[in-house]
Amino acid sequence: MRQRFDYHLLDPEQPSEIDDGNEPHLFKHLPVHGADFVRVGPEDLYDLYVTDAPVFFPARPDGPADWLIVGQVPAL
């Protein structure tokens, strides 16, 4: 049985790190503002984590991720 990490234990000052292999996933579902896609980077994820109380959904059991983080990126 899969053991997912406890996201409640994330450090509020440095909740995660994003390596080169994971960064392309940030651009998988870009938000749209008007007719243009809005770039989302690691700094936006940090802002989301500390200001918006994101919702964590379990990722697919057979996939590489434990959780999917959903929330509104501030200022978008």
Image (cartoon, helix red, strand yellow):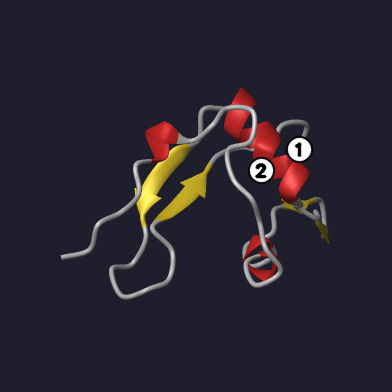
- Examine the rendered structure and indicate whether residue 73 appears above or below residue 18: above
Q: Residues within 10 Å of mark 2 (few under 14, many from 20)?
A: many
- Judge left or right: residue 59 versus residue 38: left
Q: What residue lies at 25% left-to-right and 57% top-to-bottom? A: 3
Q: Quadrant of the N terminus?
A: bottom left
Sequence-wise first label, 2 or 1: 2
Which mark is on residue 45? 2
The answer to whether residue 73 is seen in the rendering is no
- Residue 31 versus residue 11: which sits nearer the camera? 11
**How far is mark 2 from mark 1, CA to CA?**
13 Å
Q: Does dot 2 land on a helix, a strand or a loop? A: helix
Would you place residue 4 above or below residue 76 in this image?
Answer: below
* Viewer-proximal residue among 18 and 60: 18
Compared across the picture, whether 52 is left or right of 73 comes to left
Residue 70 percent location from the top left of the image? 51, 45
Q: Which residue is mark 1?
A: 76
Percent x, y of residue 49: 59, 33
Q: Position of residue 2 (x, y in %)?
A: 22, 63
Q: Residue at x 44, y 38 (%)?
A: 55
Q: Amino acid at mark 2?
A: Leu
Foreground tag (2 vs 1)? 2
Quadrant in the picture for residue 23: bottom right
Characterize the local packing of mark 1: few (<14), some (14-19) or many (20 or more) Cα atoms within 10 angstroms: few
Vertical order, 9 against 4 (above or below):
above
- Using residue 50 as the reference point, say whether residue 75 is left or right of it: right
Three-letter code, disc 1: Leu
Taking the spot 50% from the left edge, 47% from the top edge, the residue there is 69
Residue nearer the viewer, 51 or 35: 51
Q: Secondary structure at mark 1?
A: loop
